[in-house]
Amino acid sequence: MRAQKYFGVGLTGFNLIPGRPADSIGGGLAWSSLNKNLGFRSNETLIQVYYQAQLVDNLYLQPVLTFVPNPGASPDLKPATVVTVQTTGLF
């Protein structure tokens, strides 16, 4: 197995910005103990924050910032910061 242990926690807040009741803001932390016998780093941590904005009705835009201080794929990798943006349509 790649991951031997996992811990994750997150929080989401709704209606935190006046006049934007359908928007949400959140963040989370994930930690995994990895199998070093497969060449991975001993553990990996991910820290993520997001803002989900309602565009119209059931269509949302969500930018996400993720920071990985210790990428698990290899002990040689440096910390990584990733920005993603996605749209979500609820139906």
Image (cartoon, grey):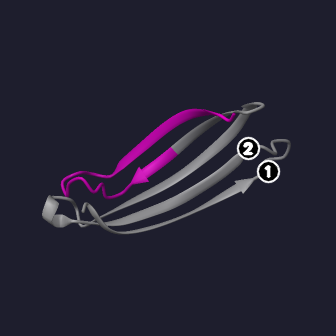
The structure residue drawn at horizontal position 15% and vertical position 60%, both measured from the top left corner, is: 38
Task: Left or right? Give the position of 1 relative to 18.
Answer: left
Q: Secondary structure at mark 1?
A: loop
The image shows residue 15 at horizontal and vertical percentages of 79, 50
Residue at far top of view: 56
Q: Name the residue that disc number 1 marks.
A: 15
Residue count near mark 2 (Cα–Cα under 10 Å), binned few <14, some 14–19, many ≥20: many
Residue at far right of view: 19
> Alpha carbon of mark 2 to alpha carbon of mark 1: how far?
6 Å
Q: Nearer the viewer, residue 42 or 65?
A: 42
Task: Left or right? Give the position of 77 relative to 21.
Answer: left
Q: What label does residue 78 carry, if any? A: none
Q: Secondary structure at mark 2?
A: loop
Please report whichever mark, 2 or 1, sits nearer to the chain's N-terminal start.
1
Q: Is residue 66 above or below residue 53?
A: below
The structure residue drawn at horizontal position 32% and vertical position 52%, both measured from the top left corner, is: 79
Q: Name the residue that disc number 2 marks.
A: 23
The structure residue drawn at horizontal position 49% and vertical position 37%, both measured from the top left corner, is: 84
Q: Is residue 88 magenta?
A: yes
The image shows residue 1 at horizontal and vertical percentages of 24, 63
Q: Is residue 3 above or below residue 59?
A: below
Circles 2 and 1, Cβ within 8 Å, touching? The answer is: yes
Residue count near mark 1 (Cα–Cα under 10 Å), binned few <14, some 14–19, many ≥20: few
The image shows residue 83 at horizontal and vertical percentages of 47, 39
Q: Is residue 83 magenta?
A: yes
Q: Nearer the viewer, residue 63 or 87?
A: 87
Q: Which residues are magenta?
A: 65-91
Question: Picture quarter containing residue 88?
Answer: top right
Amino acid marked by disc 1: Asn
Amino acid marked by disc 2: Asp
Question: Picture quarter containing residue 54?
Answer: top right
The structure residue drawn at horizontal position 42% and vertical position 57%, both measured from the top left corner, is: 46
